[in-house]
Amino acid sequence: MCGLEFPTNANVIVGLQRADDAGVYRVNDELALIQTVDFFTPIVDDPYWFGQIAAANALSDVYAMGGIPKTAMNLVAFPLKDMDMTVLRQIIQGGLDKMTEASVVLVGGHSIEDTELKYGLSVTGFIHPDRVLTKKGLLAGDSLILTKPLGTGIINTAIKGGLASGETVEGVTRLMAQLNKDAAEIMERYPVHACTDITGFGLLGHLAEMLAESSLSMRLSSRTIPVIQGTLEYAAMGLVPAGTFKNREYRECMVEFSSSVDRLMQDVLFDAQTSGGLLICVDGKKAEGLLEALQNGGVPEATLIGEVIPGPAGKIVVD
């Protein structure tokens, strides 16, 4: 924030000086702490699944930086006068089950009474100081791999409008609740130079962050980018969330679309995601090996979607 002076420390590896998925603090030569926090209002009606999704979303930032989440604390805002406590119990249970899946220990938390329900986690993870993945390490020749399909923002808008089928609701719910744990563990074995998770800024917004202040560009193939079934149809009905339009307005100056990429697909590429997949920048010579390992290792929808290329600086070309 302009005009504010923040405390600094020589042990901060990743802090407020640049936009990234989490903060990283060096404890010693062998250990650094990754710290992140995230919470939001319900995006599905089922409180148990909302808890799972919110927890998976918060844990994802640690995975995106190559770390292992270890502890978490609950963050809860709950309308006591308007909702039964059984709703909160189901939300917390969903979060606990997702933490158990991630081998994360709940060590505390904080709750307040509020008019609007909110839930999420603060998370602490471990990583070696020399192995921290940020958004800024990409190199020319890197390949771009996306581990989950796009479209959760548009699909969730359809759900809120009562237009999504039960099958669609179940599919997108399970997708958002899916941890990025397997992808993070697999990519550790490959020459990955940069990584982020795709959330509120959409695919193109997060790629733009990676290119900021860089001399590099990216080329994407829209034909290979995975999209949740039904997304384009819902987009054609006008079920595009406001956040998607804001993402386009903010970042479209960095994007050059081929005439073959229609407006609906453009909306999907800017679509604000919830608990999306990892975007992995890996040495192009090792990309096929990583992709095969992901697809055979519990990340079946992982897809090669583009590459990092030399200049012009900060440009994303979508064919």
Image: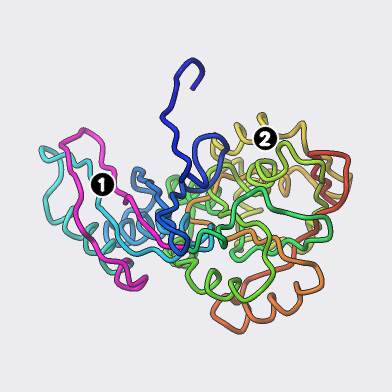
State whether residue 21 appears in this view: yes
Between 23 and 243, the one nearer to me in the picture:
23
The amino acid beneath tag 2 is: Arg
Q: CA distance from mark 1 to mark 2?
A: 31 Å
Q: Is residue 280 left or right of residue 53?
A: right
One can see residue 277 in this view: no
Main SS of the magenta part reads strand
Picture quarter containing residue 230?
bottom right
Q: Residue at x 40, y 48 (%)?
A: 36
Q: Position of residue 86 (x, y in %)?
A: 13, 56
Vertical arrangement, residue 293 with respect to residue 204, above or below:
below
Where is 132 relative to 260, above or below? below
The structure residue drawn at horizontal position 41% and vertical position 58%, both measured from the top left corner, is 59
At label 2, counting other C-alpha atoms closer than 10 Å, the crowd grade (few under 14, some 14-19, many 20 or more) is many
At 42% across and 58% down in the image, what residue appears? 28
Q: Residues within 10 Å of mark 1 (few under 14, many from 20)?
A: some
The answer to whether 311 appears left or right of 240 in the picture is right
Residue 124 in the image: state x and y as whole percent.
36, 56
State the SS at label 2: helix
Q: Does the segment drawn in magenta span residue 100?
A: yes
- Choose between 102 and 148: the one closer to the eye: 102
Measured as percent of width and height from the top left, residue 113 is found at 15, 36
Q: Position of residue 214 (x, y in %)?
A: 76, 41
At a point 52% along the width and 45% down the height, the residue shown is 14
Q: Earlier in the sequence, mark 1 or mark 2?
A: 1
| Residue 75: mark in rendering | 1
Helix, strand or loop under label 1 = strand
The residue tagged 2 is 248
What is the magenta range? 99-127
